[in-house]
Image (tube, rainbow, N blue to C red):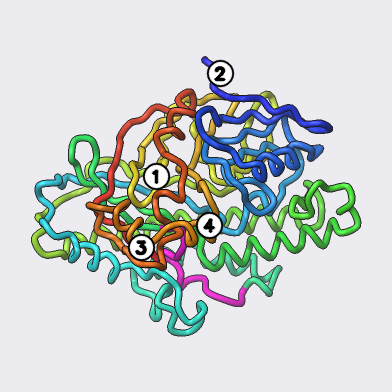
Amino acid sequence: MEKNYETLEVAGGCPVKAWVRGVAMEDEARRQLENVAQLPFVHGWVAAMPDVHWGIGATVGSVIPTFGAIVPAAVGVDIGCGMMAVKTTLTANELPDSLRELRSSIEKAVPHGRTSRGGRGDRGAWGKLPEHASRRWSKLAAAYDVIIGKHKKLDRGNCANHLGTLGTGNHFIEVCLDEADAVWFMLHSGSRGVGNRIGSYFIALARDDMRRNWANLPDKDLSYFTEGSEHFDDYVEAVGWAQSFAAENRETMMEAVVRSVRSTAKIPEFSLAEKAVNCHHNYVAREHHYGKDVFVTRKGAVRAGLGDLGIIPGSMGARSYIVRGKGNPESFESCSHGAGRAMSRTQARKKFTVADHEAATAGVECRKDAAVIDETPAAYKPIEAVMEAQKDLVDIVHTLRQVVCVKG
């Protein structure tokens, strides 16, 4: 298989294999990759995907195989964040000329955004848990009770009432058309408030556990739990539960999206045409690579084992892709999770105007106001260049373009 990556040699650490040909990699991200590569338990090398950019502790767009240890901040606080997509039997010519009502119907069906600082009355949470969300929570509740029985501080915020809700930031729900004008529904979200709480709590515990050893760490945000230590098993249990919550969250939202579209005027009857893709891109999993059972942390990366289906979204005005993994062992069977930010949210707000955003999202029924400027397409790397840089990692199965985009 053709080698399509660059190798960064790291003094005092393992190499970094970076799939960044034709795409920019910021200096801050490079330094973070070098920091991670100096950890003594990395198995072989660190893999950097073409959407790589700065994150807290570890870069977004990195794949970190570790033996006998996990870095909670490398998993992050949006545990289990990922994508889901389903193809329908609808076609483009069956959609109404105006898509505003369709967007409004989805917005009414799925709580999104955040108000009241996430407290009582928050429009991004359920006031009363609906039956379809309650049914899915019943599969998660017993394991959650075990976790909070050990760590009572975790039970201080939203949990069940976030199941089936979108959130804010780069999370979205879209109606898309593929290369044959078939209609798809696609969404992006994770474990919401409860996952954030679990991630933040264990990141703090790892820092406390390693405080005396900070001098030996390249970055205190790379504090870790070693297998057999006091909090290791509890973290694995909690992060696994949050990942399950995230997958159920996406399933619950997709149910609501399908119902809302079916109830929208001028939409004919339809069914779901292909198996849904539901994949994480912020998570940790036990896997076998190069002769060892290891923990693989994908922070902004998707598993792309041979034949695995995944989703690589662009931005609000760019193409997205349904892909099939090639099982490239050198990326630890991984690919990018999206286009990747080209600049920070603050930079984007300073650089772009509402008029810029309106032009960039022409033809898409979506928000076109100042509050979403940080998500405007030009704030992201060109998705076409990102896909070219990882042509040895995935094959493109479908190319999607959005016609409706719901943002929190």
Nearest the eye: 253 or 139? 253
> Does the magenta portion include 165?
yes
Question: Mark 1 sits on what residue?
Answer: 314
Which disc is residue 3 wearing? 2
Front position among marks 2 and 3: 3
Residue type highlighted by circle 2 = Lys
Whole-angstrom CA distance, mark 4 to mark 1, is: 19 Å
Say whether disc 2 or disc 1 marks the residue closer to the N-terminus. Answer: 2
Which segment did they paint magenta? 155-171
Say whether disc 4 or disc 3 marks the residue closer to the N-terminus. Answer: 4
Say whether disc 1 or disc 3 marks the residue closer to the N-terminus. Answer: 1
Whole-angstrom CA distance, mark 4 to mark 3, is: 14 Å
Residue in the image at 64% along x and 55% along y: 237
Say whether disc 2 or disc 4 marks the residue closer to the N-terminus. Answer: 2
Question: Mark 3 sits on what residue?
Answer: 354
Which disc is residue 347 wearing? 4
Nearest the eye: 137 or 296? 296
Which element type, helix, strand or loop, lies under badge 2?
Answer: loop
> Does the magenta portion include 383?
no
Query: Magenta segment, principal secondary structure?
Result: loop
Whole-angstrom CA distance, mark 2 to mark 1, is: 24 Å
Say whether disc 4 or disc 1 marks the residue closer to the N-terminus. Answer: 1
Residue in the image at 30% along x and 36% along y: 399
